[in-house]
């Protein structure tokens, strides 16, 4: 069994924010795998389809680890069976990168997960681009995608779907440079 975690912030206000691209990807996967909601008790919404559990933490981004550790401990997941999907401002819009372990790169959602379960889990990084000025990062990631940007991002969700079955080889098979 695998746990697929999409990072984002709960609520309509944040729904199409760049920071919520993990939620958007997991919503796509939930739909494509015809997953059913099984719980809201793990500080998040948990869905199941076959060998996959999909988690959307309701803790807000900076506390995502609180939700992940509850599901991990309850279902006895090994970190190698956890895949976290998140935004990355260091990648151009639409770029996909896959890796296991490593640093948080300053991403507060990953920092929270690392603090609760360690950093040896898989990550699917979705490029959202970077603002021109460093001081604009928070406003940038909390701003909505344009219609064109959202269309570009969603084109990669099918590659993410394919990659979760073969996450160890995903980097060579499913990476996309950008839109």
Image (spheres, rainbow, N blue to C red):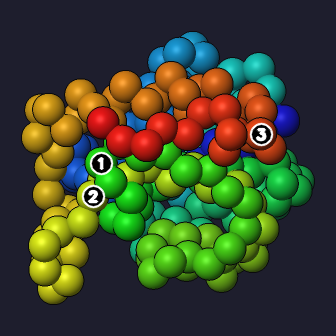
- Tell me, yes or no, whether the two marked residues, 3 and 1, touch with CB atoms within 8 Å: no
Q: Residue 9 in the image: state x and y as whole percent.
A: 34, 57
Query: Which of pointers 2 and 3 lies earlier in the amino acid sequence?
Result: 2
CA neighbours of label 3 inside 10 A, class few (<14), some (14 to 19), many (20+): few
Q: Secondary structure at mark 2?
A: loop
Q: Quadrant of the C terminus?
A: top left
Indicate the position of residue 87 as horizontal and vertical percent values.
40, 56
Relative to 125, 132 lies left or right = left
Q: Which residue is mark 2?
A: 129
Closest to the observer: 35 or 39? 35
- Report the residue marked by disc 3: 169
Give the percent coordinates (x, y) of residue 138.
Answer: 21, 75
Between the residue at mark 3 and the residue at mark 1, the CA separation in whole angstroms equals: 22 Å
- Location of residue 119 by image quarter: bottom right
Crowding near the residue tagged with mark 2, few <14, some 14–19, many ≥20 C-alpha atoms within 10 Å: some
Is label 2 in contact with label 3 (beta carbons under 8 Å)? Answer: no
Asked if residue 114 is positioned above or below residue 91 in the image, the reply reads below
User: Residue 114 bears which disc, if any?
Assistant: none
Are dots 1 and 2 in contact, CB under 8 Å?
A: yes
Query: Is disc 3 placed on a helix, strand or loop?
Result: helix
Instruction: Find disc 1 in the rendering and name its residue.
Output: 93
Residue drawn at x 48%, y 69% is: 109
Per the image, label 1 sits on a secondary structure element best described as: loop
The N terminus appears in which quarter of the rendering? top right
Q: Nearer the viewer, residue 88 or 70?
A: 88
Residue 72, horizontal then vertical, whole percent: 77, 57
Question: CA gap, disc 1 to disc 2?
Answer: 5 Å
Residue located at (52% from left, 66% from top):
64
Viewer can see residue 27: no
């Amino acid at each position: 069994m695998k746990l697929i975690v999409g990072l984002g912030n709960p609520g309509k206000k944040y729904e199409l924010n760049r920071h919520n691209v993990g939620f958007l990807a997991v919503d796509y996967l939930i739909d494509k795998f015809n997953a059913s909601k099984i719980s809201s008790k793990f500080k998040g919404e948990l869905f199941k389809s076959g060998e996959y559990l999909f988690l959307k933490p309701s803790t807000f981004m900076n506390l995502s680890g609180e939700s992940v550790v509850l599901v991990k401990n309850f279902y006895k997941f090994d970190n190698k069976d956890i895949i976290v999907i998140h935004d990355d401002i260091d990648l151009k819009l639409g770029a996909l990168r896959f890796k296991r372990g490593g640093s948080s790169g300053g991403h507060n959602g990953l920092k929270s997960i690392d603090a609760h379960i360690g950093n040896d889990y898989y990550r699917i990084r979705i490029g959202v681009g970077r603002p021109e000025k460093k001081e604009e990062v928070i406003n940038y990631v909390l701003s909505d995608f344009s219609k064109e940007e959202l269309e570009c991002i969603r084109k990669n969700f099918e590659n993410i779907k394919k990659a979760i079955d073969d996450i160890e080889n995903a980097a060579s098979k499913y990476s996309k440079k950008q839109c």
